[in-house]
Amino acid sequence: MNILIVYAHHEPSSFVAAMKNTAIEILSREGHSVVVSDLYGQGFSAVAQKWDFVTTSGNHFNYMFEQKHAAKLDLAFSPDILSEIQKLQTADLVLFVSPIWWFSVPAILKGWFDRVLAMGVAWDGGKIYEKGLLRGKQAMLIVAGGGPTEYYQESGRHKATAVQILHPINHGTLAFCGFDVHDPFVALNVLGLSDQGRLKLLTDLQYRLQHMLDSPNWLIRY
Amino acid sequence: MNILIVYAHHEPSSFVAAMKNTAIEILSREGHSVVVSDLYGQGFSAVAQKWDFVTTSGNHFNYMFEQKHAAKLDLAFSPDILSEIQKLQTADLVLFVSPIWWFSVPAILKGWFDRVLAMGVAWDGGKIYEKGLLRGKQAMLIVAGGGPTEYYQESGRHKATAVQILHPINHGTLAFCGFDVHDPFVALNVLGLSDQGRLKLLTDLQYRLQHMLDSPNWLIRY
């Protein structure tokens, strides 16, 4: 299976980096082809701009419609976007490995969603959710948050579970494009744990990665 | 009242720009002092980086703890972050004017949250929500989305209302820092409306802006 890991952390000695390294190691050992988009390492630009397109339609500038225009012109996107689109199109499974910042992903990964999941490439008019252009592919979030686990409940301080907090990504972004979305792997309280506690989380992740592909039980059902 | 408008759109002839211009005009006419952070216009950097700090603590690099370190050193942040923090500290009300992209804000505004709402400035250990460091200030999202209104229901295609979709920002970001958060102004189906329909939305926004400050009815209660 072709697996793309989109990784969004700046610090190689972070827990998020350890999760990414665990994923590369386990999935490569299982015989998969693993490609990594290291967004910080690549200096990926987060901000959607007019120069994201080789040429523009000449109409009122609407980023989404320019994406569709570029998609029609044999993917006339800037090289950094084109490269990510090609990795995405080759992938059977995309793993997003990221910290949780402000109940979401860091801007560098949000920018990947904004720029790479383009209209005409990942979705189109009338082609969303079960008709999304990326249907047949699988996706999964692997994320870590620093706060206490008990905050992440509807009756907790965050007034939402981790799954509710990630709805804009799992449903509104990934399922929207047609991905089959796996239940996220969410490591919480990472700052509060001992080294042993963090190692336990990496072992749990290893187990999930080894078994997620032969079990449909972890898919989110909408 | 000192009002900061944080504006996140690249196209001056967009509907989002029209909402921003409406806000500037109405609030200035009412006698408020209005300052605008035009994130695209400023070329605001979205990506949290090691060079966001004048000096670093020398410990394992954790962005959040470096924020706290910089905050203690009389706000030893990079000039672009410092400038935004100073505008934020002066403001009584912050309006975020933005499109909805992927059930959230564009990466350039997410990056503003990541970099400006710093630990030690906007919140701290034990100083979140009702004890957040920005308590006493008000905030409100003014956002526009392109999709049909009926999608934004728990039983609709998006499986969530607009308010649920914005929970990571209204609650997890703004309320987390101590802001009193106003019910968002959400303009939906902007692409599907006639010019008259869009003008009606701007009139609705004008009314909200004229009356929001003397009515507590629009505050979100948690």
Image: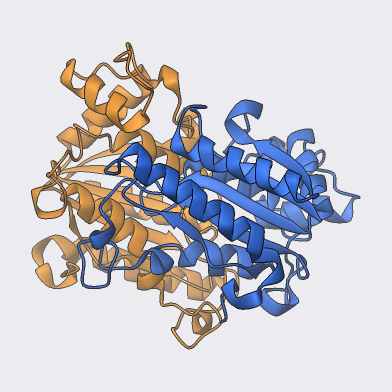
Chain colours: A blue, B orange
Q: How many marks?
A: 0
Q: Is residue A131 above or below residue A16?
A: below
Q: Residue at 82% x, 41% y: name it.
A: A55
Which residue lies at the image location 27% right of the left edge and 72% below the top edge?
A154
Q: Is A151 drawn above or below residue A24 in the view shown?
A: below
Q: Quadrant of the C terminus of chain B?
A: bottom left
Measured from the top left, where is residue B187 in percent x and y? 43, 69
Residue A182 picture location, percent across and down: 59, 67
Farthest residue toward the bottom? B155
Work out which quarter of the rendered image holds the N terminus of chain B and state it: top left
Residue at 82% over, 38% down: A54
Q: Is residue A42 left or right of residue B39?
A: right
Q: Can the viewer see residue B35?
A: yes
Q: x, y (%) of residue A88?
A: 76, 51
Relative height, residue A51 to residue B158 (above, below):
above
Quadrant in the rendering for residue A79: top right
Residue nearer the viewer, B185 or B103:
B103
* Vertical placement of residue B207 versus A71, above or below: below
Nearest the eye: A80 or A174: A174
Q: Nearer the viewer, residue A104 or A124?
A: A104
Place of residue B101 in the rendered image (x, y in percent of width and height, measured from the top left)? 53, 58
Residue A130 falls in which quadrant of the image?
A: bottom right
The quarter holding residue B193 reads bottom right
- Residue A53 makes an appearance in the image: no
Q: Nearer the viewer, residue A214 or B36?
A: A214
Q: Is residue B125 left or right of residue B97?
A: left
